[in-house]
Image (cartoon, rainbow, N blue to C red):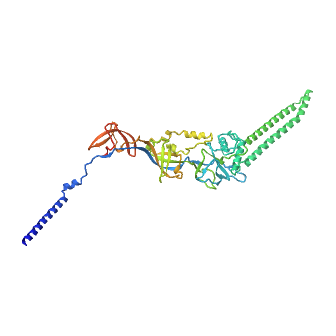
Amino acid sequence: MSRLSSRKQLGALVGAVVLVGAGGWIAGTQVRSPADAAAAHTAPKAGPVTVAVQRQSLTATVVASGSVEFASPRPLALAGAVGTGAAASAGGEGAEQRITKAPVAGTKVKEGDVLMTVNGRPVFALSGSVPMYRALGPGASGDDVNQLQRALRRLGFDPGSISGTYRQGTAAAVTSWYTSKGYEAQKPSADDEQQLGQLQQAVSAAQQTLLTTDSASAGSGGTETGAGANASTGSPNPQSSTDAQIHLLQIESARKSLDMANAALSTFQASYGTKVPAGEVVFFPKLPVRLNKVTVKTGDTASGPIGTVTSSDLEVQAVVPGADAELLRKGMAVELTTTDGKKAAGTVSALGADATSSTTGATGSGEDSEGAGGTAAEGTEDEASGTSATGSSAPVQLRISVPDSGELADEAEAAVKVTIKIGASDGKVLVVPLAAIRTSSDGKVRVQVERGGRLSDVHVTVGLSAAGLVEVKATSGTLEQGDKVVVGE
């Protein structure tokens, strides 16, 4: 028993020693000196920050935000009175120009359409580069008459020869045109008819005066003959000779008065007849157009701005920094993307001041000779004209034409992302971050390459840059895909 008890005591003692030793070892591993603790919290030694050289294709772009708009906005206003509105009759009718049917925003206007009515009379849309600035009627001549005649012919109303002079054939075509639209062409006003009557009376009075003077002269002719006989017998009559001279002067005066009356009547009759009042036609450089905004309503007066018309074509207006604008040129291809992912293709059509012009895209009708004026004006716009402001950091306006609106057809006033490709690498090239490029005082460009913990300079030439990367090609040493280049410390 005593031996067994001694063994148990020895085992307990050994176990206690083992436990104490284990506890001491564990405690020793968890306890650190102040120096060890400080060393554990010290940041590792600073070294260069590197990025691997990549081989890939590189495409440089300019990206901006833009808005979709209808092209070629221009104000709409009437050139003058509609009908006889400017010359009020005795009863006051037509004394004020009142809109009796207002234009409707969003309407697509074609040649020959009625834009609106004023005092119950129509305002027509015609194609032509010369603006309406006067009433057109018999005797008038000029480029505006020429384009009216061409428009009438396009609409199917033959004015006769396209002479640029308003004659009877033009008046007949105007009458037929108005009738086809349910309106009556503008005939001579009451004032015109009154003036014609007065001129005709003046001619009649002058004729009567001449006849009376001739009769008096004929009646005195016998006396003059008798006087001559008396003279032959030696009895002179000076009074009779003076009377004859007076009668001759009276006849000459009466004839001149008649000539003047006839001339005045002929001049007036040359402009008397069916007319197109100045306010009843608006010439547009290009049709169709779209009534974009309307600023009047039925009952308003027709003076002043009526609204704004645009082309039916879409364009995009955007603004880019001056530095980016220096990279852009007219004719560059543009990718347009809406917020919901719709895409369309466009073309840079103007930069700078040219991009804000309200008359862009204005050309004459392609069927008319007068269209040359609008085309020539547009042709004066060259690449340099739109980039005068790009030498600074100031923002530059950008206009993008959209030849085929495609998915943008219903996106007027929507925001779009504008992406313009300005260059691309020739296949896959070595590229490094822009931060890796260093320029020496001698102007040489280099990158620092880390190999085996050591840094070495490799001189390079740089090419296209895009999205923070730049194309590089080693000129001394070697540079390969996967090499580590220093971008920071």
Nearest the viewer among 77 and 19 is 19
Q: Residue 259 is drawn in which quadrant?
A: top right
Q: Nearer the viewer, residue 382 or 100?
A: 382
Where is residue 370, by image quadrant? top right
Q: Is residue 156 above or below residue 239?
A: below
Looking at this view, is 355 or 60 the one in front? Answer: 60
Q: Position of residue 418 (x, y in %)?
A: 47, 48
Residue at 21%, 56% (x, y): give it.
37
Looking at the image, which residue is at 50% across and 41% down? Answer: 331
Q: Residue 349's spot in the image, x, y percent? A: 51, 43
On screen, 111 above or below 237? below
Residue 27 shown left or right of residue 314 in the figure: left
Is residue 84 visible to the viewer in this orientation of the structure? no
Q: Which residue of the protein is positioned furthest toward the left in this rendering? A: 2
Q: Position of residue 88 (x, y in %)?
A: 70, 51
Number of marks? 0
